[in-house]
Image (cartoon, helix red, strand yellow):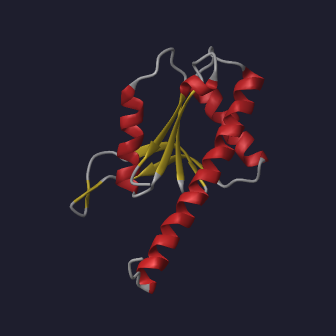
Amino acid sequence: MANVSIENYAEAQRREDAELIENVLSGKIIDAAIEVHKVLGGPGLLESIYEDALFHELKLRGMHIQRQLQVPILYKGVVVGDSMRLDLLVEGRVIVEVKSTENKHMVHSAQVLTYLRLTKLKLGLVLNFGQSLLRDGLTRVVNGL
């Protein structure tokens, strides 16, 4: 067995704990999204309706959510362009991008990955309520987990 320093072990444990927290959060978010999809149905409504309902459902479940959060874009220490706007940020850890489109588009995942990189967060979800089954519209996006 290789020698592992206390510092390396502690850092590995912190990473493992963070992954566990984000995985638990994503499970709770997906459960809430399934409830919204079950109650409102899908496809057929605007993204904003699903976002409103998901925000409300997550609040009912006692979660801290920021909605339409403006995040400045930094380039070499300078704010450039307009701020990006996150649909939902759950517990300060998971970005949720709500969609209501007929087809799944790779650009949605790329968009969330960019958000994750710029915010230095690790996990995002694309929830496309435009699918008959929510599981077909669910994409998990990971930044270094």
The image position of residue 9, as x and y in percent, is 46, 78
Does any portion of residue 135 appear in the rendered image? yes
Q: Which residue is drawn at 51% across and 14% down?
A: 102
Quadrant into which the C terminus falls: bottom left
Quadrant into which the N terminus falls: bottom left
The image position of residue 78, as x and y in percent, is 24, 60
Is residue 78 shown left or right of residue 144?
Answer: left
Q: Which residue is drawn at 51% across and 19% down?
A: 101
Is residue 35 shown left or right of residue 82?
Answer: right
Which residue of the protein is positioned furthest toward the front in this rendering? 1
The image position of residue 136, as x and y in percent, is 56, 23
Work out whether 109 lies above or below 45: below
Q: How many marks?
A: 0
Does any portion of residue 92 appear in the rendered image? no
Q: Residue at x 59, y 29 (%)?
A: 48
User: Which residue is nearer to you in this view: 118 or 27?
Assistant: 27
Which residue of the protein is positioned furthest toward the left in this rendering? 76
User: Which residue is nearer to you in this view: 16 or 119?
Assistant: 16
The image position of residue 99, as x and y in percent, is 52, 27
Is residue 82 shown left or right of residue 96?
Answer: left
